[in-house]
Amino acid sequence: MIDKLYQKTILKHAANATAHGALEDADHVVMVHNPMCGDRIKVYVKLDNGKLINFSHEAKACALCQASASVLGEHYQGLSKESLTTLLNKIKASLDAMEGPDHNKWPEKKWQDMDVFNVVRDHKSRKTCVTLPFDALLQAMTEAD
């Protein structure tokens, strides 16, 4: 079970830690905590006319959460609250779907990197680990308005 969750691609994303660290000129900072597993993530955002122009994170979390934050760090450019909400809904639907990755309908091709988290589908308690960075980012963007 653990080997399936922590496959090489997930561990590679976690190790890359893309966009990890504090953003000194952030417009807003949010810390979000998952009480179910203890994951914590702090996100920093810089916005221009409602669009995300810079993002960073500091995660004290499991490899799933760190990997998800790293994928977000690779592809965040240009997200608005609306496009992030759509993406987050797609991620949650993907994690709940049992059909497999062929049925994931990402809003943009770059988000296909999220297919690596399909292995979480069988582990209900771990889904929040994947969505936590996106939830934190949405909260930060909402509060920054």
Image (tube, rainbow, N blue to C red):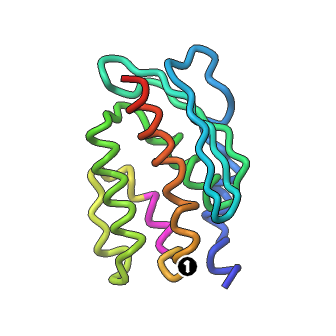
Query: Magenta stretch mostly in which secondary structure?
Result: helix
Q: Residues within 10 Å of mark 1 (few under 14, many from 20)?
A: few
Q: Is residue 88 left or right of residue 58?
A: left
SS at circle 1: loop
Relative to 50, residue 3 above or below: below
Looking at the picture, tell me which residue is in the foreground, 6 or 35. Answer: 35
Quadrant into which the N terminus falls: bottom right
Q: Position of residue 45 (x, y in %)?
A: 50, 27
The verdict on residue 64 being magenta is: no
Q: Is residue 143 left or right of residue 73?
A: left
Relative to 145, residue 66 above or below: below
Q: How many marks?
A: 1
Q: Position of residue 35 (x, y in %)?
A: 64, 59
- Residue at the (70%, 58%) spot, across then down: 38
The three-letter code of the residue at mark 1 reads His
Looking at the picture, tell me which residue is in the foreground, 5 or 28. Answer: 28
- Residue at the (45%, 60%) spot, across then down: 114
Reading the image, the residue beneath label 1 is 123
Which image quarter: residue 6? bottom right
Q: What residue span does the magenta drawing correspond to? A: 113-119
- Residue at the (38%, 64%) spot, across then down: 92
